[in-house]
Image (cartoon, helix red, strand yellow):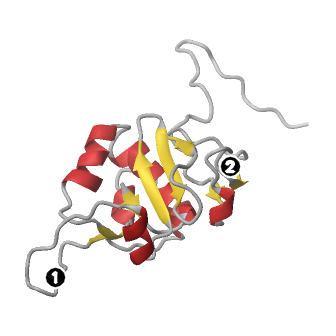
Amino acid sequence: MQLDGVPSHHLPLLLTAYQHRFGRGLEAMTRHLVDNVAIGWEELGTDLLDGAPPALITALTGGEQWPSRTLDHLITPDGSPPARMTVTDDTADAQDMQWGYVLHRQGIEVISLLHEDIGPVVDWATDPRTVFSDHPDRWSSLAAPPVIRAVRSTPPQSTPTAAPAKAGTPRRPATRR
């Protein structure tokens, strides 16, 4: 589970990480994002885009790069080791958390913690270039994820643009008129 951070930032990174870096392996992604982190994440970075096509990375980041940062470096006031917290309504309010992201087999559940305890699920097959709303009241558990702009003009990066020619079938040259 990844908390805080707006959907327009987190969803493209998480969808791309699932589709490319982790090869659609939810278990590997969960190990990286949840199990291998002592406390949690301060920021999700472009290292989650490793393995994605360069054109997709550029479309998502504008060519910028930044590292993911965990909260594992924290020191508690009494000097004891920090512990992973369980998120409840009280801790979400105390930490001023506004968003929750839960990884499910079918996709990422996006929870607007200001309005609900559950949210809609964004399918793992969603094109990472899709633009989602960051307005908490639009993320109702009773509605589809609020897409501002769907990507329809070009195929997803992992889909070939045309089927290859059959072996032994000559291609006709293009003619000009």
> Image point 64% across, 52% down: which residue?
140
Which of the two residues, 165 or 101, is positioned nearer the viewer here?
Answer: 101
How far apart, in angstroms, are the residues tagged by discs 1 and 2? 44 Å
Q: Nearer the viewer, residue 85 or 158?
A: 85
52 or 151, nearer to the observer? 151
Residue 91 placement: quadrant: bottom left
- Helix, strand or loop at mark 1: loop
Marked residue nearer the N-terminal end (1 or 2): 1
Outermost residue, bottom side: 77
The numbered mark at residue 76 is: 1
Q: Nearer the viewer, mark 1 or mark 2?
A: 1
Residue 59 percent location from the top left of the image: 56, 61
Q: Secondary structure under badge 2?
A: loop
Q: Reply above or below: 155 against 115.
A: above
Residue 170 visible: yes
Amino acid type, residue under disc 1 in the picture: Thr
Q: Position of residue 147 (x, y in %)?
A: 69, 53
The residue singled out by tag 2 in the image is 151
Q: Residue 161's spot in the image, x, y percent? A: 61, 36
Q: Tell whether label 2 touches label 1 (CB within 8 Å).
A: no
Q: Residue at x 17, y 63 (%)?
A: 38
User: Would residue 100 be found to the left or right of residue 36 on screen?
Assistant: right
